[in-house]
Image: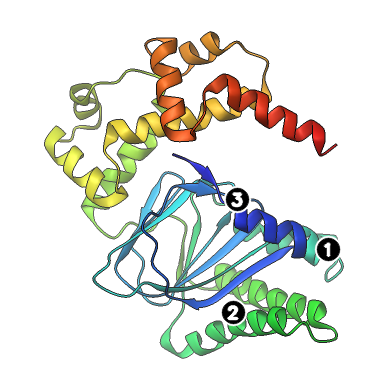
Amino acid sequence: MLTIHTPTNMALQENEIYVRSEADNFQDEWPIHTHNGYEIHYFIQGDATFLIGDRIYKPKPGDMFIFRGGVPHRINPSREIVYKRSFVNFTEILLLDMLELSQLENLMSIFRHPDGLLVHWSPEEREYISSTFKGIKEEMDARSAGCKTMVKLILTQLLLRIYRKMTTEQSVDPILISSQKQSSVSRVLHYLNQNYAENVSLDELSKTLHLNKYYICHSFKETTGYTISNYVIRKRVAEAKKLLLSTDAPILSISETLGFNTPVYFSRAFKQYVGVSPQLFRKNELLHVSQNH
């Protein structure tokens, strides 16, 4: 299921920034998720694949991913090697008083890539990069006088470093695919994200993409952690949540629009991944919105 990462959103609502430095905790589940704001994710160590939008990345130590929080993303790390990373999420509001609007717009252009931007930092550069996340984390934890200003300064310097690298060096690649398998999975992902409402069979998918269907199944599951059918249902449910909140369309209409065979199947799938029926979800969420206004 595509989930909204509530802890990140709560932190951004309270502080306009959320940071972790050299985190190495492992979760039982790493769901595809979104959140508010922007994210800079710095990969330090591990064996993983990173799904951002339609793209699959195979990160190496020193890789940094820059993307909008609203782009669906998921890390799929192996348990064999400790997965260590630093990341910072922030809102654009945080930096409004730091730069002129035109300067800020230039800096924020690094987040325009729909499937994320990849920057690779050399071993000589990594000490500085690590120190930026550590510096922001220490300021946020200490809460000393002027900490918010220090945080803004450190973050602005990091964004400037990334922007310079993006505009002057060749180590930036918005679409870095490290193997044929990941390239194939990326094509499958793109096709599914465009055609999730259609009842596409595995044979049709194989024929359309000119890939062996057994290879598709194995590679997709190994890379993303989901079977193709499971991914499609999760995608449909995620879109259903959006339609339930943003439109007054009847449940039956939403079910048909998203390609569910029957309203009963739609309701059963929705409840399996969300925990409540579509009707109750719409009622609860709209009630929550009205209470907060």
SS category of the residue bearing label 1 = loop
Closer mark to the observer between disc 1 and disc 3 = 3
Q: Are marks 1 and 2 in contact (CB under 8 Å)?
A: no
Answer above or below: position of 230 versus 113.
above
Per the rendering, the mark at residue 96 is 1
Residue 243 in view in this figure:
no
Closer mark to the observer between disc 1 and disc 2 = 2
Q: Which residue is the site of mark 3? A: 35
> The disc labelled 3 sits on which kind of residue?
His
Answer above or below: position of 2 versus 156.
above
Of residue 92 and residue 75, the one placed in the foreground of this image is 75
Q: Earlier in the sequence, mark 2 or mark 3?
A: 3
Residue at x 72% of width, y 74% of height = 156
Specify the quadrant of the image occupied by residue 43. bottom left
Q: Horizontal and vertical percent for residue 252?
A: 52, 9
Q: Which residue is the site of mark 2? A: 133
> The disc labelled 2 sits on which kind of residue?
Phe
Residue 79 in view in this figure:
yes
Q: Are marks 2 and 3 in contact (CB under 8 Å)?
A: no
Specify the quadrant of the image occupied by residue 243. top right
> The disc labelled 1 sits on which kind of residue?
Leu
Residue at x 61% of width, y 71% of height = 19
Q: Earlier in the sequence, mark 1 or mark 2?
A: 1
SS category of the residue bearing label 2 = helix
